[in-house]
Structure formats: structure tokens, C-alpha cells
Image (tube, helix red, strand yellow):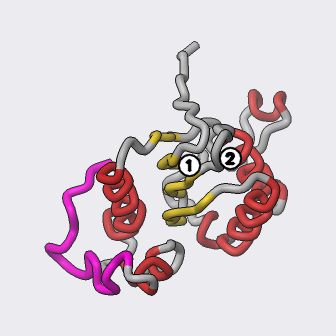
Amino acid sequence: MPDYRRAWHPGGTYFFTVNLLQRHGNDLLVRHVDVLREVVRSVRLRHPFVMHGWVVLPDHIHCVIELPDGDADFATRWRLIKMGFSKTLPRTERISTVRAARGERGIWQRRYWEHLIRDERDFRAHMDYVHINPVKHGLIARVCDWPYSTFHHLAERGVYPADWAGGEGDLPGYED
């Protein structure tokens, strides 16, 4: 069995990628984005964290969050978000025998990618990655055209120019 090592850093700032189990051609997250937002809001009330950056794509989420001082438990937050979202949906997905035996749904991948942000440069790079992702995946031509991200709020606050990465040739060279 693989040895998954997590960077448990109390009060840390993290970048996450969380994927649906069936990714290709699945638009579940944007179809139910209001439910996802409400579940995240509810989890934040019980287990606070700062949402620095967020983008919801059809089949995965990227975000940069900061945990409170002395708290390193991002795993509980993700478990509650995934579970809360799943409970709102009818049971129409295919469930493997292993998942069925464990009483699991077939909506989310079990694991997620997390990265502990090291410094301000790393923070900015991951915030940019979060917001450029819909363009990178060919969903839109301009970052400002994607409605399911924190880009609009950050542009209003002056963190990003409203036309940041706004057209052909403007995209930083990000790779998955």
C-alpha cells in the first residue's frame, strides 16, 4: 500500500485539487455549484478557514485555503465537504463493489492533492493557477468569463486587473 504523506502544518496555507471520481464529460460540480457553495459555507462555520482562492470546474476544484493558528486538520474539512455535497445528490452514480461494501458513494476520488504553500511567490503562483484553470482547460477564452471562481471578487478588490489573462497570448505557461 502506498505511503501517502501529508504536510500537516498548523495554521498553514494550502493549495488543493479535489477531483470527481468520473472526470471526463462530467459537469456535476457546476450543475450543483450552489449546493457545493452552501456545503462549504456550512463547513466553514463549524471548522473555520480562510478561502484565498477558489475555482469550481465541471469535474474538479482548485483552491488555496488558510487554516487557523494551531489547526492542521484539513482532512476533516474535505471529508465534510465531500460528504455533505454527496448527501444532497440522488444515488444515480455507478458504485464499485469495494465502495458499496464500505458504504461509500461513487462521486469523489478518495484522495486529493494538497501542497503546503512555502512563501509569497508560491502563494501568488498557486492563486494564478487557480484562476487561470478554466482557460487552461479550454472552457473559456478569458478568466473573467468563468463565473465559478473567486477571480471576480479579487478583481473588485484590486488584487487582479479585471482583464487579467484576458485573451490569446496572455496566459502564463502553466502545466498540469
Q: Would you say residue 143 sits in the magenta stretch?
A: no
Residue at image position (45%, 82%) is: 157
Residue at image position (31%, 55%) is: 125
Q: Would you say residue 165 sits in the magenta stretch?
A: yes
- The image shows residue 45 at horizontal and vertical percentages of 79, 61
| Left or right of 62, for residue 81 | right
Give the quadrant of residue 56: bottom right
Q: Foreground: 74 or 28?
A: 74
The kind of residue tagged 1 is: Val
What whole-number distance in Å separates the C-alpha atoms at marks 1 and 2?
9 Å
Choose the circle earlier in sequence order: 1 or 2: 1
Q: Which residue is denoted by mark 1 in the rendering? A: 18
- The image shows residue 168 at horizontal and vertical percentages of 18, 77
Q: Most prominent secondary structure in the magenta stretch?
A: loop
Q: Is disc 2 surrounded by few (<14), some (14 to 19) or many (20+) residues within 10 Å?
A: some
Q: Is disc 1 surrounded by few (<14), some (14 to 19) or many (20+) residues within 10 Å?
A: many
The answer to whether one can see residue 176 in this image is yes
Residue at image position (56%, 35%) is: 9
Which secondary structure, mark 2?
helix
Which secondary structure, mark 1?
strand
Magenta residues (range): 159-176
Q: Is residue 142 above or below residue 124?
A: below
- The image shows residue 70 at horizontal and vertical percentages of 66, 39
The kind of residue tagged 2 is: Trp
| Left or right of 88, for residue 13 | left
Q: Foreground: 81 or 50?
A: 50
Q: Quadrant of the N terminus?
A: top right
Marks 1 and 2: CB-CB under 8 Å? yes
Q: Which residue is denoted by mark 2 in the rendering? A: 78
Q: Is residue 101 above or below residue 161?
A: above
Circle nearer the viewer, 1 or 2? 2
- The image shows residue 86 at horizontal and vertical percentages of 77, 54
